[in-house]
Amino acid sequence: MRARYVVVVPVIALIAAGAAGLGLSQRDVEAPENVVPYFISDGTGIPGFEAQDRELARMALDDWARASNGRLRFEEARSEQEATVRLIWASPSGLYGEMRQIIDAGQVRTLVYVTPSATDQDPAFRRDPLLRDTIVYLTCVHELGHAIGLPHTREFADIMYSFGFGGDIVEYFMRYRRRITMRADIASQSALSDNDRSVLGALLAGAPLPIVPRRPVPDDNRTDR
Ligand SMILES: [Zn+2]
């Protein structure tokens, strides 16, 4: 695998801000469920995009929602403008994915970029459609993890593991690929490790609304390295 392909590291200052820093009321903090409006863009014309990739993105949202034990619920927004989290299919950039935050009409919006053509870099990926779907799916899960506030970890078993720490990138994808025999299996095979779930639980306990920030962050809060 070409070394230039990396998963981008986000820096999410909003986590450290905590609930109080986000201007949340006590009622917000005690809310049992955080509803996140999302929007998945139309990837028509994006290199490597396949129509069913939208479903992979939805399954990735479901994975995090299930792991939250009811604390997170993702709802499809009526329009892109109303979505707090926007998943955008990206043209080749040398990245599997990337997460950025912007201010749009005075509101913080989280943009999750997923590059379907990143699966074209190795002939082995192209020969196995399920491996190709695995890569798109795991990239969605990883970048959406950033979108809801999870940082990278050093644990290879974690979906939030950073390739920046080295390790076998192909195996990162293959270990999940071996667990599925058909595409539909993805819906029932979580990509999250126990540690990913622990981090999510801690995040939700300490800052219940990291994905719905109430105050602006700088426009240049780009999340790569
Ligand atoms: Zn990352």
Image (cartoon, grey):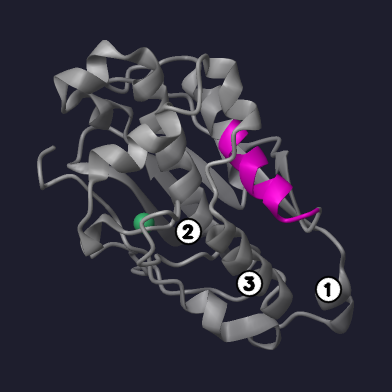
Q: Are marks 2 and 1 in contact (CB under 8 Å)?
A: no
Q: Is residue 134 above or below residue 1?
A: above
Disc 3 under 8 Å from ligand 1? The reply is: no
- The CA distance from mark 2 to mark 1 is 22 Å
Q: How many marks?
A: 3
Q: Is residue 84 above or below residue 19?
A: above
Quadrant of the rendered image containing residue 60:
top right
Q: What residue appears at the point 44 percent right and 39 percent down from the top-left corner?
A: 138
Disc 2 target residue: 146
- Give the camera-side residue of 115 and 171: 171
Whichever of labels 1 and 3 marks the residue nearer the N terminus, that label is: 1
Which mark is in front, 1 or 3? Answer: 3
Ligand 1 lies under 8 Å from the Cβ of mark 2: yes
Query: Which residue bears the numbered disc 1?
Result: 28
Q: Residues within 10 Å of mark 1 (few under 14, many from 20)?
A: some
| Residue under label 3 | 203
Q: Quadrant of the C terminus?
A: bottom left
For mark 3, does the 10 Å Cα neighbourhood hold few (<14), some (14 to 19), or many (20 or more) residues?
A: some
146 inside magenta stretch: no
Please tell me whether residue 61 belongs to the stretch shown in magenta: yes
The answer to which of marks 3 and 2 sits earlier in the sequence is 2
**Quadrant location, ligand no. 1:** bottom left
Q: Decide which of 42, 151 is in the foreground and name it.
A: 151
